């Protein structure tokens, strides 16, 4: 859905709503970190605060996102040591990893608890926060990668809000946004909240100008003290050229200091922007029953349309006949490809019915949540272009010739799932609690190729059950120890290609496991937690020649990835300031493979040590200084561990000043990212047997003014 929001219309809407409601003075808001007493939907146990759950979860609120100028999910990598980059290019989809495992954008994301597809650009302007669950996710997901889950919390109607924000950054990026909330009716039983924004994007990265638009409306109706109906709609669109990665030069890592991080290799005259055109809608009915029992029905619909286009550097056919598949040529040349996959459609539906409340069984109090989740996903594509366009160079000066012919095939997919879940928190004593979770899933999946006579259709269904167990003990009112164990599931089918002897067959589901021990403490001055985890994830591998010969190879389970680590996080608070910090030490290794040379190797693009710090201090009335630090250790570039990416550190700084002018609250924010203009390779994802290198963005500034009436 196309959205065109002018500055005039947004300002008019603000003025209209401000006139309709009585203006009120807002208190000063300071940047705060995690709240140990805040409940998280993604925890799975209702309103239980984070500090009481036997797992690690994190809620990143709106103010923390604004303070760091975060516009997309990739920005979460600044705030939590457990969250890292997995292939984050400007102008494109955000890809994250948690505890060293790449999240699956099809299965590891939620929106107000409902599954969504994150193969798109997700707007944060109408999100009240982002929840991050760390570790095995089988308690909340039928199928997903084992690192964790990300849940987006939609802004809902609250008390009166009339806010207008103007923002400027980088080489001329300008954005205007508004947040309006109003309750009305005799008993204020009706509520509406509008979030809208429009932005002209001009980043530091060359040749990536674009636009972002958002329109989101949420409403609720309190039919009675026990009944509430909520509805919301969101439409957003992003149009922007994306950023391909650099790569190795032959078998050598180029010096990051010698590469201008502003160079965009997607700079051909025929380059076109990637367009993400998205809409979301949901209905939620909540009914309070007798006692503390509650029933809920929640439906959501997502419709995504994407035009994915890129001048794509990949590999190199050298003049001497050598072909470099995993890198560019030693002299900096590479093969340029014209990639186009337009009118991609990805639609999702999810319906959840749940019941929760407490009861006494066998003399013990049980807090129970149970429900059914039905999901459907389908994707529809047309033929795509993936054609050689000439030879490029890392200087960004070479010119190539477009070839947008849609010769290449694409794959349509259909997926249905039915899931039953049951969670129970049992109070064994005043200090000791048991936590039980069980999810049974039934999935049906099919696929077929389009734009070719070789459809390679697949069709299979599977059923599996994922348990989860936890035990927590309150050492004192502020300190809790816990242990938990859980499983997660991933499902895969052998490619339906003639080279595979088991082509088109569903493989036994990958069942990952996590064991975790932790301590948590919360007080008025500090919230902290410490966790040790051990995750095992089985792996699939191809065995045989795997050439064009029929039945030359087979895909089956082989070995596992084992990630063991220590995680610490703390939010220290003192009068006028605080420090939000996290640290993760990770030992990730491959083990148990029939190919002995693979055992003991580290996965590519996973640092062993990560530190994230966010400090804040009030300098004088209304003025607060902020300082951020990200430290990521060395990581492997190649699967054989023959090359490492050096460690790097980035420092950010910001100021926040708020004051009152009449009835209007003025909030000024200004920041400098990468304050020291550090040059380094930020990450090195390895995909399609190719090394990608993404540089740290150069020093850039940002400023905004928020007016709240």
Image (spheres, grey):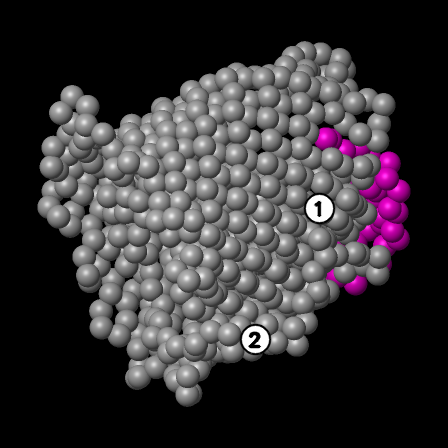
Rendering quarter of residue 501:
top right
Examine the rendered structure and indicate whether residue 701 appears above or below residue 145. below
Rendering quarter of residue 436:
top left
Badge 1 local density, few (<14 within 10 Å), some, or many (20+)?
A: many
Instruction: Judge by depth and name the residue closer to the eye, 348 or 225.
Output: 225
Residue 106 coordinates in the image, percent (x, y): 57, 37
Which corner quadrant holds the C terminus?
bottom left
* 389 falls in the magenta region: yes
| Residue 678, disc | none
Residue 169 coordinates in the image, percent (x, y): 58, 74
Instruction: Please say whether residue 1 is visible from this viewpoint.
Output: yes
Which residue lies under the disc numbered 2? Answer: 16
- In the rendered structure, the answer to whether residue 130 lies left or right of residue 274 reads left
Residue occupying the point 62% across, 60% down: 214
Residue occupying the point 87% across, 46% down: 404
Label 1 or label 2, whichever comes before in sequence order? 2
Q: Residue furthest front?
A: 186
Examine the rendered structure and indicate whether residue 705 appears above or below residue 634. below
- In the rendered structure, the answer to whether residue 586 lies left or right of residue 258 reads left
The span shown in magenta is: 385-412
Which residue lies under the disc numbered 1? Answer: 305
Q: Secondary structure at mark 1?
A: strand
């Amino acid at each position: 859905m196309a959205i065109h929001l002018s500055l005039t219309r947004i300002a008019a809407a603000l003025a209209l709503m401000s006139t309709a409601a009585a203006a009120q003075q807002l208190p000063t808001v300071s940047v705060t970190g995690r709240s140990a007493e805040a409940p998280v939907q993604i925890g799975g146990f209702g309103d239980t605060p984070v500090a009481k759950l036997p797992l690690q979860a994190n809620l990143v609120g709106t103010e923390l996102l604004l303070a760091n100028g975060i516009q997309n999910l990739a920005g979460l990598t600044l705030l939590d040591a457990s969250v890292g980059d997995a292939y984050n290019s400007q102008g494109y989809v955000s890809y994250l990893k948690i505890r060293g495992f790449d999240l699956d954008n099809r299965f590891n994301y939620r929106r107000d608890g409902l599954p969504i597809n994150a193969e798109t650009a997700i707007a944060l302007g109408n999100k009240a926060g982002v929840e991050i669950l760390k570790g095995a996710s089988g308690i909340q997901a039928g199928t997903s990668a084992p690192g964790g889950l990300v849940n987006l919390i939609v802004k809902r109607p609250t008390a009166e809000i009339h806010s207008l924000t103007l923002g400027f950054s980088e080489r001329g990026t300008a954005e205007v946004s508004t947040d309006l909330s109003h309750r009305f009716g005799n008993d204020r039983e009706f509520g509406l909240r509008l979030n809208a924004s429009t932005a002209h994007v001009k980043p530091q990265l060359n040749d990536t100008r674009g636009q972002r638009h958002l329109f989101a409306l949420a409403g609720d109706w309190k039919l009675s003290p026990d009944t509430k109906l909520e509805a919301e709609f969101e439409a957003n669109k992003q149009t922007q050229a994306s950023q391909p990665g650099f790569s190795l030069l032959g078998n050598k890592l180029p010096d990051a200091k010698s590469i201008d991080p502003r160079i965009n290799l997607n700079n051909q005259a025929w380059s076109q922007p990637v367009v993400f055109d998205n809409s979301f809608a949901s209905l939620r009915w909540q009914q309070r029953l007798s006692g503390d029992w509650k029933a809920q029905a929640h439906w959501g619909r997502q419709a995504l349309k994407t035009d994915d286009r890129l001048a794509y550097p990949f590999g190199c056919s050298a003049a001497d006949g050598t072909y470099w598949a995993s890198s560019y040529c030693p002299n900096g040349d590479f093969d340029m490809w014209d990639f186009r996959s337009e009118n991609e459609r990805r639609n999702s539906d999810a319906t959840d019915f749940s019941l929760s409340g407490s009861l006494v069984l066998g003399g013990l109090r049980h807090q129970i949540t149970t429900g059914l989740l039905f999901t459907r996903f389908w994707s529809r594509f047309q033929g795509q272009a993936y054609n050689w366009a000439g030879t490029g160079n890392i200087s960004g000066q070479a010119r190539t010739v477009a070839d947008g012919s849609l010769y290449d095939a694409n794959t349509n997919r259909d997926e249905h799932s039915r899931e039953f879940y049951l969670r129970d928190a049992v109070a064994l004593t005043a200090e000791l609690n048991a936590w039980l979770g069980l999810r049974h899933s039934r999935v049906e999946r099919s696929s077929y190729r389009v734009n070719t006579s070789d459809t390679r259709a697949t069709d299979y269904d599977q059923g599996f059950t994922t348990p989860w167990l936890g035990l927590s003990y309150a050492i004192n009112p502020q300190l809790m120890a816990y242990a938990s164990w859980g499983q997660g599931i991933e499902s895969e089918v052998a490619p339906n290609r003639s080279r595979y002897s088991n082509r088109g067959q569903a493989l036994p589901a990958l069942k990952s496991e996590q064991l975790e021990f932790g301590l948590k403490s919360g007080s008025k001055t500090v919230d902290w937690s410490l966790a040790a985890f051990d995750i095992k994830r089985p792996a699939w591998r191809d065995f045989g020649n795997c050439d064009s010969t029929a039945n030359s190879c087979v895909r089956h389970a082989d070995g596992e990835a084992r990630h063991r680590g220590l995680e610490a996080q703390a939010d220290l608070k003192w009068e006028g300031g605080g420090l939000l910090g996290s640290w993760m030490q990770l030992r990730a290794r491959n083990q148990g493979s029939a190919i002995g040379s693979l055992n003991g190797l580290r996965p590519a693009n996973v640092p062993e040590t990560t530190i994230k710090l966010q400090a804040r201090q009030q300098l004088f009335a209304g003025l607060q200084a902020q300082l951020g630090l990200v430290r990521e250790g060395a990581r492997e570039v190649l699967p054989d561990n023959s090359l490492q990416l050096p460690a790097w550190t980035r420092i950010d700084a910001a100021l926040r000043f708020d004051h009152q002018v009449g009835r209007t609250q003025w909030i000024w924010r200004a920041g400098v990212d990468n304050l020291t203009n550090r040059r380094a390779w930020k990450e090195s994802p390895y995909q399609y047997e190719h090394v990608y290198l993404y540089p740290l963005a150069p020093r850039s500034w940002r400023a905004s003014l928020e007016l709240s009436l």
